[in-house]
Image (cartoon, rainbow, N blue to C red):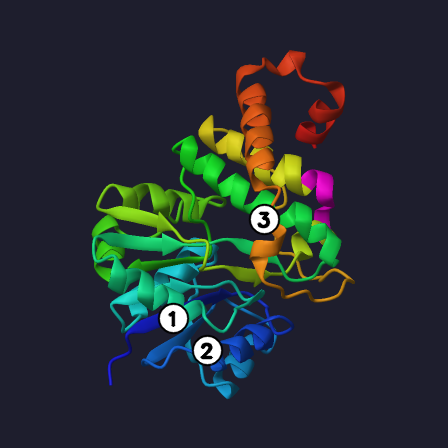
């Protein structure tokens, strides 16, 4: 039977994180047929063996890079709807059902995406993380800079129409995909299509560089056509924090205030000449 949804997981040496994701896919409430594709992008560990042992179809992609791996999985997918997940995600049980419902209820959309919430965190930290995640996405949408990012599902016909992921990029591949998809149809940001992702990159480079470097400085560099410098390499060490999987709505109360703060800060960074920025911020952006 042809699957209704294909889940594509690009990987490179993900033996430590991949099992949690595949386990979360096994307990989905969605009852329709779906397939799981793990794209092995030249892993030297047991990523492929783990994927096969847990029932996933493995595709090997020799061209190194995130965009190459995603393209291999998307073009190799059998379903008309393709959902993508990173290897360090854990999915709520309703994720696939939310994907299916989004396209069934909105036949006019070509793609849908949702928030990425932290997998490892203390509960009180989530009052910052959750609103920041959603606020950042709506800010990018407001600025017309794209907003779907890695937690995304697309119609395969639309994906093929735009020519897939841009393999010349080393950062912002998902954002560029969103730009191109908006040219051929409507895209939707659905707060119910959330996932939990490891905070391993924050462990790798620290919170300040994650916020002001990886998130803000890299985005501004893309907008200005400059080189992206912050934290683009693989991160493999998970934070030594409890895994917190909670209903996200209780943590989104500060969201309106945070959206306003993000608008002010981003407008300031875009409008202020480099030599007039605070020295502390300049030091972060210079590294």
Regarding mark 3 in the picture, which secondary structure is present there? loop
Query: Can you say whether 212 is above or below 13 in the image?
Result: above
- Earlier along the polypeptide chain: callout 3 or callout 2? 2
Badge nearest the viewer, 1 or 3: 3
Local crowd at mark 3 within 10 Å, few (<14), some, or many (≥20)?
A: many
Instruction: Magenta stretch: give its range.
Output: 204-209
- Mark 2, residue position: 28
Regarding mark 2 in the picture, which secondary structure is present there? loop
Q: Main secondary structure of the magenta part?
A: helix
Mark yes or no: residue 232 visible: no
- Earlier along the polypeptide chain: callout 1 or callout 3? 1
- Mark 1, residue position: 97
Label 2 with label 1: CB-CB less than 8 Å: yes
Residue 207 sits inside the magenta stretch: yes
Label 3 and label 2: CA atoms lie apart by 24 Å
Q: Nearer the viewer, residue 244 or 273?
A: 244
Identify the image quadrant of residue 217. top right
Taking 60 as reference, is 181 left or right? left
Specify the farthest residue to the right.
240
Mark yes or no: residue 189 visible: yes
Label 1 and label 3: CA atoms lie apart by 22 Å
Local crowd at mark 2 within 10 Å, few (<14), some, or many (≥20)?
A: some
| Residue 92 in the image, given as x and y percentages of width and height | 52, 69
| Residue 192 in the image, given as x and y percentages of width and height | 45, 59
Query: Can you say whether 91 is above or below 110 in the image?
Result: below
């Amino acid at each position: 039977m042809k699957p209704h949804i294909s889940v594509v997981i690009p990987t490179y040496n993900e033996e430590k994180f991949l099992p949690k994701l595949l386990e979360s896919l096994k307990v989905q409430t969605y009852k329709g047929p779906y397939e799981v594709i793990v794209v092995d992008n030249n892993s030297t560990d047991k990523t492929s063996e783990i994927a096969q042992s847990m029932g996933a179809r493995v595709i090997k992609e020799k061209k190194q890079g995130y965009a190459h791996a995603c393209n291999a999985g998307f073009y190799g997918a059998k379903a008309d709807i393709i959902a993508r997940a990173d290897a360090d995600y854990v999915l709520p049980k309703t994720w696939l059902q939310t994907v299916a419902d989004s396209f069934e209820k909105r036949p006019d959309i070509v793609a849908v995406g949702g928030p990425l919430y932290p997998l490892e965190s203390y509960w009180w930290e989530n009052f910052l993380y959750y609103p920041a995640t959603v606020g950042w996405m709506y800010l990018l949408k407001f600025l017309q800079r794209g907003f779907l990012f890695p937690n995304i599902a697309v119609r395969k016909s639309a994906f093929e129409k735009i020519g897939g992921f841009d393999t010349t990029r080393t950062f912002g591949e998902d954002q560029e995909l969103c730009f191109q998809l908006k040219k051929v149809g409507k895209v939707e940001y659905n707060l119910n299509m959330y996932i939990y992702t490891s905070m391993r990159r924050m462990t790798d480079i620290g919170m300040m560089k994650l916020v002001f470097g990886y998130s803000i400085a890299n985005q501004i560099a893309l907008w200005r056509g400059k080189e992206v410098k912050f934290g683009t390499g693989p991160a493999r060490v998970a934070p030594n924090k409890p895994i917190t999987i909670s209903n996200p709505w209780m943590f989104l109360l500060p969201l309106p205030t945070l959206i306003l703060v993000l608008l002010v800060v981003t407008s300031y960074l875009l409008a202020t000449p480099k030599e007039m920025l605070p020295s502390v911020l300049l030091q972060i952006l210079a590294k």
